[in-house]
Image (tube, rainbow, N blue to C red):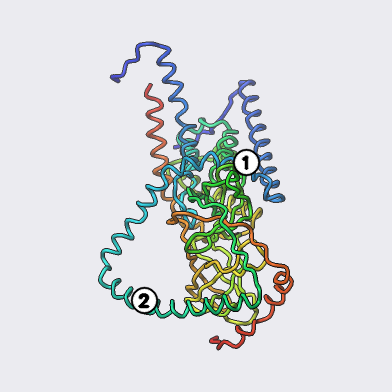
Amino acid sequence: MAASGSKRPGFSRRARFGLFVGYVVAITGALIGLGLVLIAIFDPQGFASIRGATADVTAPVSASGRSAVQSGGRIDNYVANWWNAGQQNAELRAELRVARRRLIQARATELENSRLRALVGLLEGQSEPIATARLVNSSLTSARRTATLFAGRDRGVLPGQPVRAADGLVGRIIDSGNSASRVLLLTDRSNIVPVKLARDGTPAFTSGRGDGRVEVHSLEAGRRPFREGDILITSGTGGIYPPNIPVAVILDVFGDSALAAPFANPGSLDFAIVQPVYEPPENESTTNPDGAANPRESGSDSPETP
Amino acid sequence: MSRIVAADENLALVRAQLALIPAASVLFGSLLNLVPLVTQAPILPPMALMIFLGWRFLRPEIWPIWAGLPFGLFDDLLSGNLIGSGMLLWTVILIALDLAENRAMWRDYWIDWVVATAALIFYIIAAMALNSFAYGGWGLLPLLPQIVATILLFPIVLRLCARLDRRRLTL
């Protein structure tokens, strides 16, 4: 088929003028759009109120269908469990035996810990959760990984607060509306979380990959601190995220960086917990730069397997 | 046609409603972002833009040249991209299609498909680029599944638009 130019106005002066005005409006509008984008680039919090208000309007819509989708998403799990029941049973028994032993050890450690803590007089700021709510939807088309949390300023949720689940860290609040807010997920490419290895406390940081995994980078140049199966917990360095929240488990090691899978899967969460912004105590924040730059004693003793 | 509408004003009302089908379908595409799923990667193709372009290829005269502004803004609000990026990119795409069409000698199904695919990939990557300018986090790899889904889904969306178009023109 030969192409027919879409909008030939012919010789009508009026039609030509209408077409011209259309172009003027379109180009002006596109430039306004560009202006809005530039405002957002120079002031990322500029449109937070608009975004919050949008979340307010859209969250109830998504929330109504959320529970149905959630139970639907688990059907494959049920089927798989049924299929593997026998093998799983044996595995779980073995795991339980190990876990019981560890539990006793952990109890002993806990006792010792509390004794030592009392000795030092350290007051751990165990923060009360601000709100507990559902994640109702997420940015399905955008490259930014955000989710909508069905709790807003009316329950004290404000931008910057960390969000976690029972399993581990989920992300942090970026915009909050009146009754809903948006969460920047751990797996977003711009979300950087200071962590440490649960094994020896080696400092590192994770950054999202945008596909459900996170990358881990060591803060210590030239060392290869990661091993497969290592567990990462938040270090509390720099504030925002309180220390000792489980973050991810390392799947693959590439030199001094690694690939890790987050513990909390926002897709199957029942509830997410919003916590107050963590402020590191004075003495810790002053010693932090040294602690991050130098290998710690316990870290440097541990046998290295390059 | 078995349907006979008795009163003229009734017919006019139905016609007015049917005339809203294209715009309503694009808005519906934006509303798909509210599906209550929390995903770890962008998996849903930009449905609103696909429906918008579907109508554009079916009926080249259907959208005024500035139509990308309101639809793009609505999509920005729901998709989580930067506000204004849809206004900018949808209008750029529409103007580019207009220029290309006035220049093209030939047009068939496959050329349409290639052009639409190029426009959609441009949108996905440009929206990601604008996001990364504002917040950081450049990366093409996570977008690949979405791009593939977009390419494969566009013919289906086109067909859907054609079906809606037939419904629109029955009265």
Locate residue B1 relative to residue A107 in the image: left or right.
left
Q: Foreground mark, 2 or 1? A: 2
Return the residue at label 2: A95
Q: In front here: A146 or B156?
A: A146
Q: Is residue A151 above or below residue A226?
A: above
* Tags 2 and 1 on a common chain: yes
Residue A154: x %, y % from top left: 59, 43
Q: Is residue B24 above or below residue B9?
A: below
Q: In front here: A44 or A163?
A: A163
Residue at (65, 39) in percent of width and height? A30
Q: Quadrant of residue A7?
A: top right
Q: Is residue B112 above or below residue B125?
A: above
Residue at (65, 29) in percent of width and height? A20
Return the residue at label 1: A50
Chain of residue at mark 2: A
Q: Residues within 10 Å of mark 2 (few under 14, many from 20)?
A: few
Q: CA distance from mark 2 to mark 1?
A: 50 Å
Q: Secondary structure at mark 1?
A: helix
Q: Mark 1 belongs to which amino acid?
A: Ile
Quadrant into which the C terminus of chain A falls: bottom right
Locate residue B12 relative to residue A45 in the image: left or right.
left
Residue A106: x %, y % from top left: 48, 77
Sequence-first tag of 2 and 1: 1
